[in-house]
Image (tube, rainbow, N blue to C red):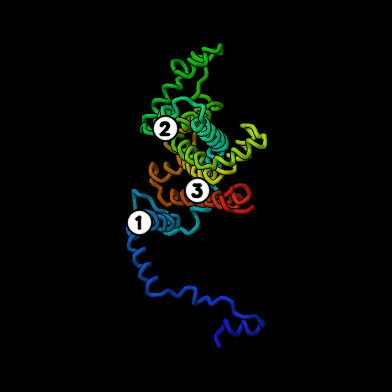
Amino acid sequence: MDMFSELDAARGTPRLIDIRAAFRMTGAQRAEAKWGLLFISPWLIGFAIFYLVPMVVSLLFSLYDFTLSAPDEARFVGLQNWSRMLLDDPNTWETLFVTFKFALISLPIGMVSAFLLAVLLNSQHLIGQNIFRTLFYAPTMVPLIAAILIWSRVLNPQTGWLNQLIEVVGIEAAGINGLRWLDDPNLIYIAYTFIGLWGIGNAILINLASLQGVPTELYEAASIDGAGWLRQLWSVTIPMVTPVIFYNLILSVVGLLQFFIVPWVLNLGSGYPEGSTNFYMIYFYKQAFTFQNMGYGATLAWFMFIIGLAITIFLFATGRYWVYYAGESK
């Protein structure tokens, strides 16, 4: 009598599941599994070489005092890098604060804008739907660096188009005393959000596809019950597209935690104005590649990975309370 049978006999209950049988495969299943592994082997090899191995190596780097300029002088320091980052380096928490502050401003604006624009582009009353869909998606085809440089001119306090448009409504925006979007710590995050909105075409496209997948009979039933457009949007549309909203939320959070290119292109990561653009990834880049302190840089990278993983797990844990999947009962 094996261990499982003895436990079942001691409990006086029949054995319902044979754990070993659950992992036993027939010859056909083994052949199918081999072919499956063969077809996905290019991805597995690429993942191992370009993701898994570098992640393991970077984790080892975080335990060493290692600089790119003197790799032969690397020495094991254990958790000293982690202790320095968490307890002795105020820049870690300052840059995290800047990153989360910007994310709290930019995330809701980006998410809501992409969804509402998708709703607009999905409207049957919109004339020239295909033209507008193309126009809203086209900016994503512009290289990011070029888009940032374009926006730096658009947001120019004296000659920028945005301030010129604001002047039309009677608000003093241009000139020396005008709105200095990229120079004022109180406006810089709004300016960066404007630049981010330039590239929400992908989010609009994904939301648009989800909106077109909502069954029309649900709208018909809601209309018969007397629901207006806003009520249908709130009670039918949004619940049915929550999986896509959740997907966009995860991507947006990860992207904002890695926010780097815009402040680097505009001011080379100097933190201007007044340190308000000293993002976490800027600090990581400087430590790892400017100062060539790869050991400490790896520690910063892993700390951000842990933060991102924790936020993602939290979102998945709470998603079951507001994300609706077809065929699922709540």
Classify mark 3: helix, strand or loop.
helix
Q: Quadrant of residue 41?
A: bottom left
Quarter of the picture containing the N terminus is bottom right
At a point 50% along the width and 42% down the height, the residue shown is 213
At a point 41% along the width and 27% down the height, the residue shown is 131
Classify mark 1: helix, strand or loop.
helix
- Disc 3 designates what residue? 304
- Camera-near label (1 vs 2) is 2
Classify mark 2: helix, strand or loop.
helix
- Disc 1 designates what residue? 43
Amino acid type, mark 1: Trp
- Camera-near label (3 vs 2) is 2
Q: Are marks 3 and 1 in contact (CB under 8 Å)?
A: no
Residue 24, image x, y percentages:
45, 75
- Disc 2 designates what residue? 137
Dot 3 crowding, Cα within 10 Å, few <14, some 14–19, many 20+: some
Amino acid type, mark 3: Met
- Would residue 267 appear left or right of 95 to someone viewing this image? left
- Camera-near label (3 vs 1) is 1
Residue 21, image x, y percentages:
49, 76
Residue 174, image x, y percentages:
49, 14
Q: Quadrant of residue 36?
A: bottom left
176 is higher (above) or lower (below) than 141:
above
